[in-house]
Image: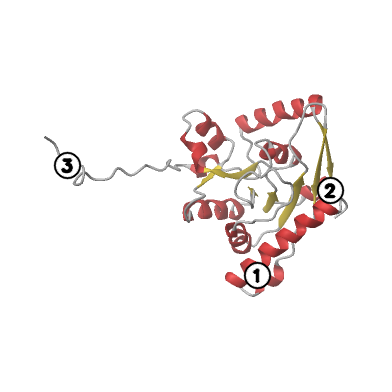
């Protein structure tokens, strides 16, 4: 007989490899063919079958680098943000489980997705985010870390504050008012960059991160309650 069950080594589940992200990183001046084609297809779809109205879109014309954050209600949220940010291609954080799919995973990497392990401290994803901003690119983050049916952002993951403070770049909030539906209006609101200079002057620590998380939450409450915010 072979080894007893007690003596058999436990099999550890391998995490999806996050190789060569830098080769698919979107930075100003470089256009990805797959990204350009995908954005064009969805642009046609949304303009023919969905009526998207964006208030404050001009705020997305800010010179990169910057971070755009958005509430997360559907799989279409990264697509919506990508269509509204015309000047740049966006590097979005996405759950690492998506990288397991042999075809979809490769496609998402070519669409500049940064895979992140939501269940562990993922320093590799953190470094990838900072590489994007250092290279002058646009970083997209869903601060809730997963999709939520409610439009109000209540729980914000601490990692977004750490990335924002360490990067030293502006952070623009975007509110997406629900899931896109055929022949239904979809409202999107873009707010002013969230003030962080005073927090950065105090350094990156637990207190400044918590204060920034509070500001993010308050910003989304204002965007939800007051369209002109």
In the rendered image, the vertical position of residue 194 relative to residue 205, given as above or below: above
- Classify residue 165 as left or right of residue 54: left
Q: Secondary structure at mark 2?
A: loop
Q: Classify mark 1: residues with Cα within 10 Å, few (<14), some (14-19) or many (20+).
A: some
Label 2 to label 3: alpha-carbon separation: 65 Å
Question: Label 2: which residue?
Answer: 56
Q: Secondary structure at mark 1?
A: helix
Taking the spot 15% from the left edge, 40% from the top edge, the residue there is 3
In primary-sequence order, the first of circles 2 and 3 is 3
Taking the spot 58% from the left edge, 50% from the top edge, the residue there is 132
In the rendered image, the vertical position of residue 35 relative to residue 113, given as above or below: above
Q: Classify mark 2: residues with Cα within 10 Å, few (<14), some (14-19) or many (20+).
A: some
- Classify residue 79 as left or right of residue 108: right
Question: Label 1: which residue?
Answer: 200
Label 2 to label 1: alpha-carbon separation: 26 Å
> Residue 4 shows which numbered tag?
3
Farthest residue toward the bottom? 202
In primary-sequence order, the first of circles 1 and 3 is 3
**Quarter of the picture holding the N terminus:** top left
């Amino acid at each position: 007989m072979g080894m007893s069950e007690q003596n058999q080594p436990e099999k550890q589940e391998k995490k999806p490899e996050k190789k060569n992200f830098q080769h698919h990183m979107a930075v100003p001046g470089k256009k990805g063919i797959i990204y350009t084609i995908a954005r064009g297809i969805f642009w046609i779809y949304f303009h023919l079958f969905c009526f998207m109205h964006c208030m404050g879109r001009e705020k997305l014309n800010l010179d990169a680098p910057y971070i755009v954050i958005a509430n997360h209600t559907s799989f279409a949220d990264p697509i919506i943000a990508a269509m509204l940010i015309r000047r740049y291609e966006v590097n979005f954080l996405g759950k690492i489980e998506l990288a397991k799919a042999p075809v979809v995973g490769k496609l998402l990497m070519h669409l500049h997705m940064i895979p992140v392990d939501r269940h562990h401290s993922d320093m590799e994803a953190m470094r990838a985010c900072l590489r994007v901003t250092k290279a002058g690119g646009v970083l997209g983050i869903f601060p809730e870390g997963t999709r939520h049916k409610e439009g109000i952002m209540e729980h914000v993951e601490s990692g977004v504050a750490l990335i924002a403070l360490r990067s030293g770049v502006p952070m623009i909030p975007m509110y997406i008012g629900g899931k896109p539906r055929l022949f239904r209006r979809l409202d999107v609101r873009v707010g002013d960059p969230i003030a962080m200079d005073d927090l950065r002057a105090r350094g990156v620590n637990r207190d400044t991160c918590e204060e920034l998380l509070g500001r993010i939450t308050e910003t989304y409450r204002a965007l939800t309650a007051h369209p002109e915010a």
